[in-house]
Image (spheres, rainbow, N blue to C red):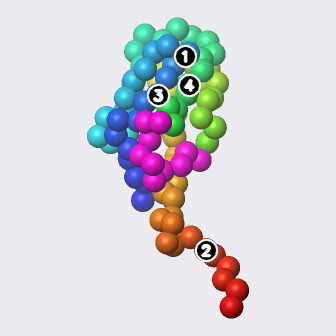
Amino acid sequence: GDEFISRARIILDGKTVEESDYDGTYFFKDIESGKHNVRVDLNSLPIQYLPLIKLSNTIEVTEGTVYVFHVPVKKRLPADQSTTNETR
C-alpha cells in the first residue's frame, strides 16, 4: 500500500511553503487560476525515500476546482540489501 510522509515541504511558485500533515496531505489556499510551479523540497523527505517524479512540476489550476498533486516515493533498499557482484 501507499506510505504517507508527514512534514514534507511543498513549495508553490518559489515562495509559499506548506508541510504535509500526518497522512501526507497539504493544502494551498486562494491560488489564482493559471500555471504554477510546485516543487518538492528533497531535503524535507526522510533519507530512505526517493521521489518517483520530477522535483519541480508545472501545474494548471482553474477557478472553482481542487487540484490534486501526488508525490509518489520509493523506499531505498538498505546498503546491506543492495545487489552486489562478488568475484572469488
- Dot 4 or dot 2: first in sequence order is 4
Look at 51% across and 66% down and name the residue there: 79
Report whether 1 appears left or right of 54. Answer: left
The disc at residue 10 is 3
Gap between marks 1 and 2, in whole Å? 38 Å
Query: Image height check: is 83 above or below 8?
Result: below
Residue 76 in percent (x, y) is at 51, 59
Element at badge 4?
strand
Q: Is residue 18 at least partly visible in the picture?
A: yes
Which numbered marker is on residue 83?
A: 2
Instruction: Give me the C-alpha separation between circle 2 and circle 3.
Output: 33 Å
Q: Secondary structure at mark 2?
A: loop
Q: Are marks 3 and 4 in contact (CB under 8 Å)?
A: yes
**Which residue range is magenta in the image?**
43-52
Inspect this view and state whether residue 62 appears.
no
The residue that label 4 is drawn on is: 38
Residue type, label 4: Val
Residue drawn 46% across the image and 28% down it: 10
For label 2, the crowd category at 10 Å Cα-Cα, with few meaning under 14, some 14 to 19 and many 20 or more, is few
